[in-house]
Amino acid sequence: MKHAVVTGAAQGLGLETCRRLLEAGHAVTLTARTEAAIDAGLADLGRPALLDGAVLDVSDDASVAAFFAARTAPVDILVNNAGRIYGAYEATFDNTTPADMLDALDNNAVSAYRTIRAALPGMNARGWGRIVNVSSGLGSLGDGMGAGAVHYRVSKTAMNAVTLIAHNAARPGVKVNSVCPGWVRTALGGDAAPRDIATGAAGIVWAATLPDDGPSGGFFRDGQPIAW
Ligand SMILES: NC(=O)c1ccc[n+]([C@@H]2O[C@H](COP(=O)([O-])OP(=O)(O)OC[C@H]3O[C@@H](n4cnc5c(N)ncnc54)[C@H](OP(=O)(O)O)[C@@H]3O)[C@@H](O)[C@H]2O)c1
């Protein structure tokens, strides 16, 4: 049994990731920005003994510091799932601002840097850890950058850089990967997405529970490598 922390976990892929990690026998901390969101998530999962909840706003230094200062259990598995879409395909150079870009970078990429710098030292000291940055194919430089989703794309590309740097800072036994869940029917993905939440979450849980001979420093969808 490992101790997992999932960010932005009151709904969507984060909530399903919590469910599956619990089913796999792990202790899970469901985190979200508000007590109300946490309570809804805990209720959805049936409040099992191995589940708890905590406030964590990954865009807020003080919130991240308070979460890790209050934590008594180790963080063996960290799933950086929290994210926002910032207008998706209709967000272009023409109708967005540098302030929006900075906000997206803060919320979707600096966020992962914040939690990893808090969690990685303990993982390195214990010689075991799994970090999953929930990224997106829209952040893939190799897969073609379209003209839309300008903030989201840049923020997920930056998140992927955090993945690789953290991988290089990780000691043996600690694995750090980016995962694209595919286009999934969530509040963020919308109703037109072809994938259900279970399918999208499966690839996240795969990376969160990799065996000792599993990969690190990669970008994956459905457990298969994809282009950075
Ligand atoms: N759905 C897709 O097609 C798709 C595709 C590729 C990648 N992804 C990624 O998958 C992850 C999960 O998205 P989802 O599809 O499950 O969407 P979702 O249902 O909208 O869930 C996203 C969650 O992130 C939370 N969040 C955002 N900013 C936060 C912050 N600063 N601190 C804490 N929580 C924060 C949101 O909470 P609030 O209500 O408080 O904002 C929300 O609960 C995201 O990183 C997303 O970019 C999704």
Image (spheres, rainbow, N blue to C red):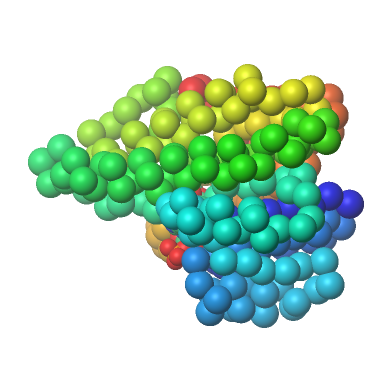
Residue 141, quarter of the rendered image: top left
Q: How many marks?
A: 0
Q: Is residue 228 left or right of residue 171?
A: left
Residue 101, quarter of the rendered image: top left
| Image location of residue 64, percent across then percent down | 54, 53
Q: Is residue 165 left or right of residue 27?
A: left
11 and 90: which one is in front?
Answer: 11
Q: Is residue 190 left or right of residue 209?
A: left
Residue 17 visible (yes or no): no
> In the image, what residue occupies the spot 63% across and 20% down?
168
> In the image, what residue occupies the spot 24% across and 47% down?
100
Residue 37 visible (yes or no): yes
Asked if 4 appears above or below 209 in the picture, the reply is: below
> In the image, what residue occupies the spot 63% across and 32% down?
177
Asked if 121 appears above or below 200 in the picture, the reply is: above
| Image location of residue 71, percent across then percent down | 71, 58
137 and 78: which one is in front?
Answer: 78
Residue 223, quarter of the rendered image: top right
| Image location of residue 224, percent across then percent down | 65, 29
> In the image, what residue occupies the spot 83% across and 35% down?
126
| Image location of residue 113, percent across then percent down | 51, 38
